[in-house]
């Protein structure tokens, strides 16, 4: 069933009953859910789990994918009154997992989301004063810790999918450990910490949490037949497509397919190809329902992956690694794993964020294969050889060791941690990453050194912490108040918080460029995006049709509107006045320079650009409206390294603005005249 001969390696993977309905279940549905709960592998250990955690400060819980730990352990602790009337938090690395877990547990308890069970993710809080089981992204709990470092609302914090080692999860390890120690010293209600995963370096985690005992949950339930290729695959996309359609032709209906790919662009391209190929299949082949799943999709679009497959159709889900953990997608019998992931790496010397497509870890491979055995026996097709698999890293390299730490450092300072370099990290990041982050925050005016020679937040820094944004974007919003262009900057920041709002299909590239020419600003991409947003907002008819005609991503535009509303509320709460600059767009570009002056580039005599901060040769990205222009000075939002180092989201600026905004910085650089 694969384009090359496959060899097999069987392993069992258990089931976690899934679901995602917002409505309260009927009596019959509720009884079925209770029956499913009692059939979960974790159910027989209910009393033991309650008893163990009742008497422990910290516990490490290892349970097979699908054992039921994510949905059941919080309920067990609630039902056993281990929470003592306080909130039980269960963190997830991704918003889709937090939302779907809350929906499932709410259904199991026969309540609406937002009552006893709720979720909190970025720009979406579905909780109330009644909520005691709270599923949330790790980033949201970290933001709460800024306001309350003792985490007084919580009696139990469950850090789920700990093996993923996201930057927020890693920081949370230290934050909750500190909160636990402080509460103990103050004779407050103890804070219990539960760290959960299907796979992790158990000794490393246990040692970090003061030799915490490890609780192993039995519960292998459904076998997964793992198939490897016998030869290396040079084109994993092609191999994926062939494997999808061979499965589709041979497997009976009712057995859906989950494919792991590296990102939105790759997924959308494959969705289009699969839909096109499906049109030419023989009449005896059933139709396919091809569904994308990635973080930038609006919630309503993400939920399509979890809806029951219509009769007579096979569902094929193309997902990034957000489908690796916790979430259950009913009907999945086949997983196709090319063994690749897109990971972010930060070059502290070159101050460059890189997105690299690289091999997954063995832990990730095990998580992916487990998706095929959630509800019954399944098959995972690994599109790499067993020898290649043996060469993968055992565990994923912590994100904390490969990302820009400016936002993390800002959050630590906001929690009163004055020496981030000596924070109790489980795995300490490189010292130059931390020093670079501190220097960046200092240049943005967010931190200073107090009388005791410790780092401290400035007034501007405290204002920046209020926004769930990169510090450069937060600084831009604060500057908009003084430059009286908050309405425009609020829109631009919201537009920058999603993936591209436009698309250029290869078959209609000229047509798409022509359609959007009327929005193009000679001053750059930011004002072009603003013009598109204003035109979209001004449509009183069919917005989707307008987006289709103008090659604008309607889903991302809907997300932009939601983000803007949330950021506007934060601005008003901060006492910021909503003012527009009218047509004085110089103020908008100057405001952007305030946040991104470190991302400035200068045109050289040979017609090429170099960055002012590192003197790195760079080019304007071909997608930019300034691609064929040669302005003397520009600022950009990010650099992307492919064959060249490209600047994305570019605007023209006046060099005098840069010097005015950061005279010491540019006096030191001596490049802006």
Image (cartoon, grey):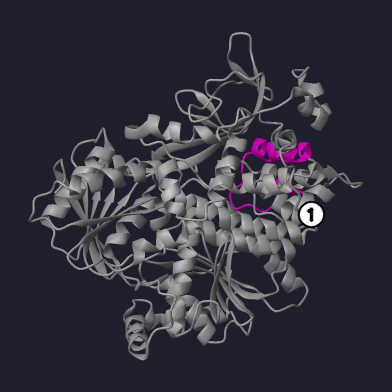
- The residue labelled by disc 1 is 577
Q: Is residue 303 left or right of 232 when viewed as pictured?
A: right
Q: Visible in this render: residue 590?
A: yes
Q: Nearer the viewer, residue 180 or 121?
A: 121
Q: Give how far across and how far down residue 119 sits, in percent.
A: 54, 70
Q: Is residue 85 above or below residue 614?
A: below
Q: Is residue 99 above or below residue 524?
A: below
Q: Give how far across and how far down residue 307 sits, in percent.
A: 33, 67
For the point 48% across and 67% down, the residue is 99
Q: Nearer the viewer, residue 279 or 141?
A: 279
Report crowding for label 1: few under 14, some 14 to 19, many 20 or more residues within 10 A (C-alpha). Answer: some
Does the magenta segment cover residue 644? no
Furthest-top residue in view? 606
Q: Nearer the viewer, residue 36 or 188?
A: 36
- Rendering quarter of residue 608: top right
Q: Is residue 258 above or below residue 21?
A: above
Q: Give how far across and how far down residue 182 sits, in percent.
A: 74, 68
Q: Visible in this render: residue 295?
A: no
Q: Nearer the viewer, residue 655 or 194?
A: 655
For the record, the magenta segment spans: 418-444
Q: Is residue 284 left or right of 89 when viewed as pictured?
A: left
Looking at the rendered image, the quarter that the C terminus falls into is: top right
Q: Give how far across and how far down residue 4 sits, in percent.
A: 15, 40
For the point 13% across and 62% down, the residue is 252
Q: Is residue 118 above or below residue 206?
A: below
Furthest-right residue in view? 451
């Amino acid at each position: 069933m694969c384009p090359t001969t496959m060899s097999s390696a069987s392993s069992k993977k258990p089931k976690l009953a899934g679901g995602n309905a917002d409505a309260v279940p009927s009596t019959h549905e509720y009884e079925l859910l209770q029956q499913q709960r009692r059939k979960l592998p974790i159910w027989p250990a209910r009393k033991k789990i309650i008893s163990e955690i009742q008497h422990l400060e910290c516990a490490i819980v290892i349970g097979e994918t699908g054992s039921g730990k994510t949905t059941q352990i919080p309920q067990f602790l609630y039902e056993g009154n281990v929470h003592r009337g306080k909130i039980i938090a269960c963190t997830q690395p991704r918003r889709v997992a937090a939302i779907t877990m809350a929906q499932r547990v709410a259904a199991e308890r026969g309540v609406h989301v937002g009552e006893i069970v709720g979720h909190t993710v970025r720009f979406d809080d579905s909780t109330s004063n009644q909520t005691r089981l709270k599923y949330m992204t790790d980033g949201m709990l970290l933001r709460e810790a800024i306001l309350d470092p003792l985490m007084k609302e919580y009696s139990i914090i469950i850090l789920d999918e700990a093996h993923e080692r996201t930057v927020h999860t890693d920081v949370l390890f230290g934050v909750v450990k500190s909160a636990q120690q402080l509460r103990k010293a103050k004779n407050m209600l103890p804070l219990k910490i539960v760290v959960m995963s299907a796979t992790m370096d158990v000794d490393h985690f246990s040692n970090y949490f003061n030799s915490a005992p490890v609780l192993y949950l039995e519960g292998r339930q459904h076998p997964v037949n793992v198939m490897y290729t016998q030869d290396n695959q040079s084109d994993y996309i092609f191999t994926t497509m062939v494997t999808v359609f061979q499965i589709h032709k041979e497997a009976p209906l009712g057995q859906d397919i989950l494919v792991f790919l590296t990102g939105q662009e790759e997924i959308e391209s494959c969705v289009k190809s699969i839909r096109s190929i499906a049109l030419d299949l023989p009449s005896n082949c059933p139709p396919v329902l091809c569904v994308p799943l990635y973080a930038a999709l609006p919630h309503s679009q993400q939920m399509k992956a979890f809806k029951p497959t219509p009769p007579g159709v096979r569902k094929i889900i193309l997902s990034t690694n957000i489908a690796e953990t916790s979430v259950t997608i009913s009907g999945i019998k086949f997983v196709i794993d090319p063994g690749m992931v897109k990971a972010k790496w930060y070059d502290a010397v070159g101050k460059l964020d890189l997105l690299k497509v690289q091999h997954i870890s063995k832990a990730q491979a095990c998580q992916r294969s487990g998706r095929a055995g959630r509800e019954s026996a399944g098959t995972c097709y690994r599109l790499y050889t067993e020898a290649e698999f043996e060469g993968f890293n055992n565990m994923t390299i912590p994100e904390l060791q490969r990302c820009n730490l400016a936002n993390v450092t800002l959050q630590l300072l906001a929690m009163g941690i004055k020496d981030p370099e000596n924070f109790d990290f489980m795995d300490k990041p490189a010292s130059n990453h931390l020093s670079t982050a501190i220097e960046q925050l200092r240049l943005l005016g967010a931190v200073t050194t107090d009388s005791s020679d410790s780092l401290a937040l400035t007034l501007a820094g405290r204002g920046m912490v209020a926004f769930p944004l990169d510090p450069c974007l937060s600084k831009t919003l604060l500057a908009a108040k003084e430059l009286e262009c908050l309405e425009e900057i609020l829109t631009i920041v919201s537009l920058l918080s999603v993936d591209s709002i436009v698309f250029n299909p290869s078959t209609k590239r000229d047509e798409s460029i022509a359609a959007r020419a009327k929005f193009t600003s000679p001053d750059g991409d930011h004002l072009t995006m603003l013009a598109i947003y204003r035109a979209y907002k001004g449509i009183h008819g069919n917005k989707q049709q307008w987006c289709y005609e103008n090659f604008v991503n309607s889903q991302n535009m809907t997300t932009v509107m939601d983000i803007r509303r949330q950021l506007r509320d934060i601005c008003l709460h901060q006492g910021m006045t909503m003012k527009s600059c009218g047509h004085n767009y110089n103020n908008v570009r100057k405001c952007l320079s305030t946040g991104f002056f470190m991302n400035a580039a200068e045109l050289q005599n040979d017609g090429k650009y170099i960055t002012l901060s590192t003197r790195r040769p760079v080019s304007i990205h071909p997608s930019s409206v300034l691609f064929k222009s040669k302005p003397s000075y520009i600022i950009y939002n990010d650099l992307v390294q492919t064959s060249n180092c490209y600047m994305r989201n570019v605007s023209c600026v006046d060099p005098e603005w840069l010097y005015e905004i950061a005279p010491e910085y540019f006096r030191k650089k001596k490049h802006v005249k």
